[in-house]
Image: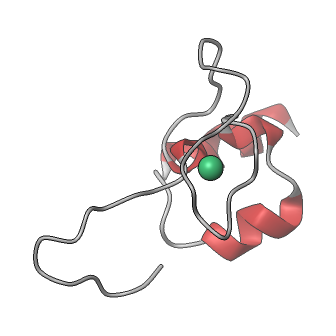
Amino acid sequence: MRNISINEEITFDYAMRNYSIDYFPPKCVCGSEFCRERVTGWKDLPETKKEEYKGFVAPYLYDLDAEIV
Ligand SMILES: [Zn+2]
């Protein structure tokens, strides 16, 4: 998460808005130095990554986590 320049492409981890992702190519090709290698949903993120994304993800993801625990 950082400021971007005018005309710079916005990229984000789909797990920041999708609880699960069922249909996606198995290997991510985003090219980010922070790439997780696979496109997966919020439910598949390790707690350390969830903490890193805190405040930048869709609020409903926290609601689902609370329901499941
Ligand atoms: Zn990637």
In the rendered structure, the answer to whether residue 46 lies left or right of residue 18 reads right
**Which color scheme did the rendering employ for the protein?**
secondary structure
| Vertical placement of residue 7 versus 13, above or below | below
Q: Which of 19 and 25 is in front in this view?
A: 25
Say whether residue 33 is left or right of residue 4: right
Q: How many labels does the image show?
A: 0
Q: Which residue is outermost to the left?
A: 6
* Residue appearing at x 65%, y 14% in the figure: 22
Residue 4 at what x, y percent from top left? 27, 82
Q: 17 above or below 34?
A: above
Which quadrant holds the C terminus? top right
- In this rendering, the answer to whether 42 lies above or below 26 is below
- Residue at 48% over, 43% down: 17
State left or right for residue 6 relative to residue 18.
left
Q: Where is residue 7 in the image (x, y as percent from the top left)?
A: 12, 71
Q: Which residue lies furthest to the top in this view?
A: 23
Front one among 3 and 5: 5
Residue 57 lies left or right of residue 43; in this view the side is left
Residue 3: image location, x then y, percent: 32, 87
Please give the name of the residue rendered at 74% of the width and 38% of the height, measured from the top-left corner: 38
- Report which quarter residue 28 is drawn in: top right
* Image coordinates for residue 51, horizontal then vertical, percent: 74, 72
Say which of 51 and 38 sits in front: 38
Q: Say which residue appears at 80% left-offset and 48% top-offset.
A: 45
* Residue 46 placement: quadrant: bottom right
